[in-house]
Image (cartoon, rainbow, N blue to C red):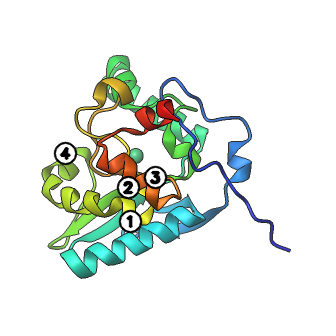
Amino acid sequence: MSETKNPNYFVLVNEDNRLPNGFEDTVELIPSENIAGNQFQIEKKTYDAFCALREDVLKNDGIQTVLLGSYRTIEQQEKIFKSNFEKFGLDYAKKYVAKPGYSEHHTGLAIDVGILLEGKLYRTKEELLSVDYLFEIIQKKLPRYGFILRYPRGKEAITKIAYEPWHYRYIDSLSIAQEITDKGMCFEEYCQKV
Ligand SMILES: [Zn+2]
């Protein structure tokens, strides 16, 4: 017997909103591995939607995308926070790394997408920002697959996160993803409205 899990695809997780207790129990995670051999888990429908997006941009735009990451446990986020704190100091860690429990990656519904271009995998923040022109093409197609750009330009004061052309959030509704995109809203603004 397989149990159908149905997470709240509209859950808001950010600096002020912690991952709700028990949320992870509602998510069906599946294992995935990218071409660089990185293994991770991702929510099932989010993965299916990413595969469809990947195929679309490869076929129609010649852009080769690579899933860099998705679900993170609170323990993994603690490690990321700690290593940034040790390398760059507390101010940097606080500014650039979500506190454990407050990262959207805990939901399994967020993905980080890298790009394989002429044999090189673009994956660091600097590398990814350098191919923003490719992400702009990808971003136009996100709502067709139920994704939104989670940290758009110009919304930093609301999201508290700098523009991340690579971080997409699955919300399981093509029409609402389209509405959010067309209106140029960030997810916080949409959640306030409803
Ligand atoms: Zn991310």
Q: Which residue is mark 2?
A: 178
Tell me the residue that label 1 is attached to.
144
- Sequence-wise first label, 1 or 3: 1
Toward the viewer: 128 or 109?
A: 109
User: Who is closer to the viewer here, 140 or 15?
Assistant: 140
Judge the density around disc 3: few (<14), some (14-19), many (≥20) Cα neighbours within 10 Å: some
- Identify which amino acid the numbered label 4 is placed on: Glu
For the residues bearing labels 2 and 3, Cβ distance under 8 angstroms:
yes
In the rendered image, which residue does mark 3 sit on? 176
Label 4 near ligand 1 (CB < 8 Å): no
The amino acid marked with disc number 1 is Arg
Q: Is mark 3 within 8 Å of ligand 1?
A: no
Instruction: Give whichever of 61, 69 is nearer the camera.
Output: 61
The quadrant in which residue 186 appears is top left
Q: Is residue 172 left or right of residue 135?
A: right
Q: What residue is at 36 percent from the left and 68 percent from the top?
A: 36
CA gap between label 4 and label 1 equals 28 Å
Q: Determine whether 94 is above or below 13 in the image.
A: above
Q: What residue sits right under mark 4 in the picture?
A: 126
**Quarter of the N terminus within the rendering:** bottom right
Q: Position of residue 107 (x, y in %)?
A: 57, 46
Say few, some or many: other residues with alpha carbon within 10 Å of mark 4 (under 14 / 14 to 19 / 20 or more): few
**152 relative to 46, above or below:** above
Circle 4 SS class: helix
Residue type for callout 2? Gln
Question: What's the distance in space between the residues labelled 2 and 3, CA to CA?
Answer: 5 Å
Do the residues under discs 1 and 2 have CB atoms within 8 angstroms? yes
Sort mark 2 into few (<14), some (14-19) or many (20+) by Cα contacts within 10 Å.
many
